[in-house]
Structure formats: structure tokens, C-alpha cells
């Protein structure tokens, strides 16, 4: 009914990796649907693929009766025995439809099914490939803009770099190369959708992995990374080898490693912080290059009150609060920064009332532990770890 399809099916199975049984079932289903449409669903039809001749054959089934009432679904016993002498009344008799009755429609249908299955297989293949690559950094070429979103050619597939995942002030033109982080892969009605990001912290982590062999080998671990894309970032690192300085490994000789990352991120300033299980010490490092006088830890509320010298307050807070905001995200605790003068004023106000002072002492005994951190240790955290911008942010 439809020309020899074996060669076509075998070629598609080989080239596109489609399961042969799935393709054959789809052909049978499509041809049957076309036949039912041709005969307006008035007949009992079945479609079967004849593997020997490579054709989809359509059979019409009728019930053998003594007297025909429905000519579309019944056949007289005498007429039926001319086809099959052994039939009896009540048997179901299958007769193959003539090829000319709707062969053109069947051929078109078969072609459409094969094309559709090839497309589905390609989409499925792309989806399976890229869903396992979520978290990787890929290189692509900008093809076009669509309402502020970038369509990026990755070779086998196109990916989407939405406007919100682009770094402010980064501009691209058609044919520009772009490096981005695969943040998600979803299957939609139009096929797989690969979502890229230039703002995800994962991009920062992946770039350091590619630049720092110690990270790729697992000697140095990035415990946390936070960003305000295009402006500043902080990463916390720890070494699993006492002979390897995690911060120095990330900075590289003369800052070469971190500068490569900064260059890829178009000048985004990066603070490399030594991670510590001691939350107070970790927070002090996260606020570098600011010096810290002392830290009060509230474990219950996961908050930190950090006292800094008066002349360090602007440095600790950072421009528009950026430094303390990133530090809080990196540590994962709320951080409240106060100058020594302000902290002293609050202590004096509290001491004006004996009852208030007693409450403070009692509450402090239960909930707050003062953990003094030696200023020199904080100062000695490599201030040069902050790379790519001004040495000291100023509060606006």
C-alpha cells in the first residue's frame, strides 16, 4: 500500500537512533488514522506493517452473517466462503484493502510520520544531552535578539540567554562569542529549551574550576559564592591540604588566575575569602578588607553584631551597602554592623537603668557570647584578594 519502507526505516533508525518498533507502530497508527478518515470511521479497520515487503497494509474486518444488515461491517456467508471456504457464521473475516483506494494519502501520511519522528528524536537527543550538562559553562555564538533576550547558537542547539540573566552593561552583537552557564534545561511544546545565565554564581565557580587546577582536583573547595553581577562577588574557599593556601591558589602567580576570571566577567571585582567553620571568624574574613573589633553571635536567630573601628565603618558597609550585603549572603547569617562609638553609646544608654542592665546581662548570658577576634588576623587576610576594582569601597 505504501512503497517499500524498509530501507528508509533502517536508515532513520541508524542515523537518528530511533527505536525501529516505535517508528513502525507510529507508521501503522498514522496510516490507520488516514484510512479511518478516508472511510469516515464507518468500517472496522486495522493496519499492520508487512516486514517482508516493507509496506503498511490496511485490513477491513467484517462479521460473517446469514443476512446482511450493515454492509460496511457485515458480509453474507456465501460471499465470505468465496474468500475463505472455512468461515462460519459469526466469524470475523479480514480483507486487505486495495492499494489504489487511498495509497496516495497513505504515502503522504507515512512521509509525515517519518519526518515527525525524526524531529522528535532529534529534540529528545538534544534534551538528553543538555539536561546532563546543567551546571556546565558553554561557549556559543549570538545569533539574534528577541525582545531583549539573546538566542545563542551552541552548535547542535539554540539556547536562550534571557534579559534578566544578562549582566547589566554587557552588550552583544550578532556573531559575538559568549560564554555562559547552563542553569536549566526544559522540554517544551517546541522542543528542548536550554536556559543560559551570565549572572548565576555557578558561572563564577565554573570559571575558577577551569582556571585553578587545585579546585578541579578537589584539593581546594569553593564552599560558597555570591555575586552582584557586573559589580562585585565573593567566594569562600577552603583547602583540604594543609600545604596548599586556598586563597593563594585561586589568586595565582601575580594574580594571573583570578585576573582571567575577572576578565571573563568584564571587570567584576572578586573577593576571595578563607572559609572557616567558626562563624565569627568567617564573618570577619567576609567583611575584608575592613578591620573588626569584636563579634557578638546570636545562634538562635542566626545573626551577628559586628563592631568595627569608627574609621572602618564605611569600608565594612561598602558602597551602597554592597560589602556587608554580600558578606551576609556568603555567611548565610544576618549581619548588623556598628561603629565602636555607636556600640559604646548603646551600652551607656542601657546602663542608665539597673533593671534594663539586669535584663541585658541575663539575656546576654543565655543568647549571646562575645567572641573577640584579633584585628591583626583580619587585616592579614589578603586584602589583595579583592581584585578587579578599587582597593577600598566607600560608603555613599
Image (cartoon, rainbow, N blue to C red):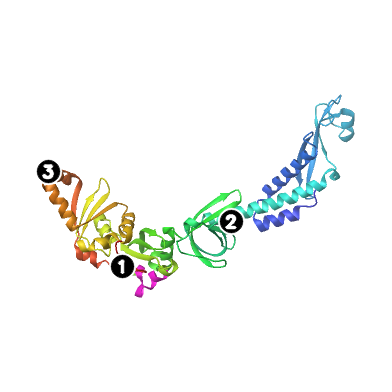
In this picture, residue 105 sits left or right of residue 79: left
Tell me the element at label 2.
helix
* Picture disc at residue 358: 3
Instruction: Tell me which residue sits at (67%, 51%) in the image.
Output: 117
Between residue 172 and residue 39, name the one nearer to us.
172
Residue 257 falls within the magenta-colored stretch: yes
Distance from the alpha carbon under mark 2 to that under mark 1: 41 Å
Q: Is residue 335 magenta?
A: no
Q: Residues within 10 Å of mark 2 (few under 14, many from 20)?
A: some
Mark 3, residues whose alpha carbon is within 10 Å: few (<14), some, or many (≥20)? few
Please tell me which of labels 3 and 1 falls first in the chain.
1
Describe the element under mark 1 as helix, strand or loop.
loop
Q: Which residues are magenta?
A: 249-260
Give the label, 3 or 2, closer to the camera: 3
Residue behind mark 2: 126
23 up-or-down from 275: above or below: above
The answer to whether residue 71 is above or below residue 171 is: above
Q: Residue at x 58, y 56 (%)?
A: 126
Q: Position of residue 96 (x, y in %)?
A: 82, 40
Whole-percent x and y of residue 217?
40, 65
Instruction: Judge whether residue 134 can be spotted in this image.
Output: no
Amino acid at each position: 500500500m505504501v512503497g517499500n519502507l524498509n530501507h528508509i526505516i533502517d536508515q532513520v533508525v541508524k542515523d537518528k537512533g530511533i527505536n525501529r518498533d516505535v517508528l513502525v507502530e507510529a507508521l501503522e497508527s498514522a496510516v490507520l488514522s488516514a484510512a479511518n478518515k478516508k472511510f469516515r470511521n464507518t468500517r472496522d479497520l486495522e493496519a499492520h506493517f508487512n516486514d517482508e515487503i516493507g509496506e503498511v497494509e490496511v485490513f477491513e474486518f467484517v462479521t460473517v452473517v446469514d443476512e446482511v444488515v450493515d454492509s460496511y461491517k457485515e458480509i453474507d456467508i456465501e460471499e465470505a466462503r468465496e474468500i475463505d471456504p472455512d468461515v462460519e457464521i459469526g466469524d470475523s473475516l479480514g480483507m486487505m484493502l486495495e492499494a489504489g483506494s487511498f495509497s496516495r494519502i497513505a504515502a503522504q501520511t507515512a512521509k509525515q510520520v517519518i519526518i515527525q519522528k525524526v524531529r522528535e528524536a532529534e529534540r529528545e537527543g538534544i534534551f538528553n544531552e543538555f539536561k546532563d550538562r546543567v551546571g556546565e559553562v558553554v561557549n556559543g555564538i549570538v545569533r539574534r535578539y528577541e525582545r531583549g533576550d539573546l538566542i545563542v547558537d551552541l552548535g547542535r542547539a539554540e539556547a536562550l540567554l534571557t534579559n534578566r540573566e544578562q549582566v547589566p552593561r554587557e552588550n552583544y552583537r550578532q556573531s559575538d562569542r559568549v560564554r555562559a552557564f547552563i542553569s536549566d534545561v526544559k522540554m517544551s511544546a517546541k522542543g528542548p529549551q536550554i536556559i543560559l545565565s551570565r549572572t548565576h554564581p555557578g558561572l563564577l565557580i565554573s570559571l575558577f574550576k577551569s582556571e585553578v587546577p587545585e579546585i578541579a582536583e578537589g584539593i581546594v573547595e569553593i564552599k560558597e559564592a555570591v555575586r552582584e553581577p557586573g559589580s562585585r562577588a565573593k567566594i569562600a574557599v577552603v583547602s583540604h591540604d594543609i600545604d596548599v593556601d586556598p586563597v593563594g591558589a585561586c589568586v595565582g602567580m601575580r594574580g594571573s588566575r583570578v585576573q582571567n576570571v575577572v576578565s571573563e566577567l568584564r571587570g567584576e571585582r572578586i573577593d576571595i575569602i578563607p572559609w572557616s567553620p567558626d562563624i565569627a571568624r568567617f564573618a570577619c574574613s567576609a567583611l575584608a578588607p575592613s578591620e573588626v573589633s569584636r563579634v557578638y553571635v546570636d545562634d538562635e536567630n542566626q545573626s551577628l553584631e559586628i563592631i568595627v573601628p569608627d574609621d572602618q565603618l564605611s569600608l565594612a558597609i561598602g558602597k551602597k551597602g554592597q560589602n556587608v550585603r554580600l558578606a551576609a549572603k556568603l555567611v548565610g547569617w544576618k549581619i548588623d554592623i556598628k561603629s565602636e562609638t555607636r556600640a559604646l553609646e548603646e551600652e551607656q544608654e542601657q546602663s542608665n537603668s539597673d533593671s534594663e542592665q539586669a535584663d541585658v546581662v541575663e539575656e546576654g548570658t543565655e543568647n549571646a557570647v562575645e567572641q573577640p577576634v584579633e584585628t591583626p588576623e583580619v587585616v592579614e587576610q589578603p586584602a589583595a584578594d579583592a581584585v578587579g576594582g578599587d582597593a577600598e569601597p566607600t560608603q555613599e
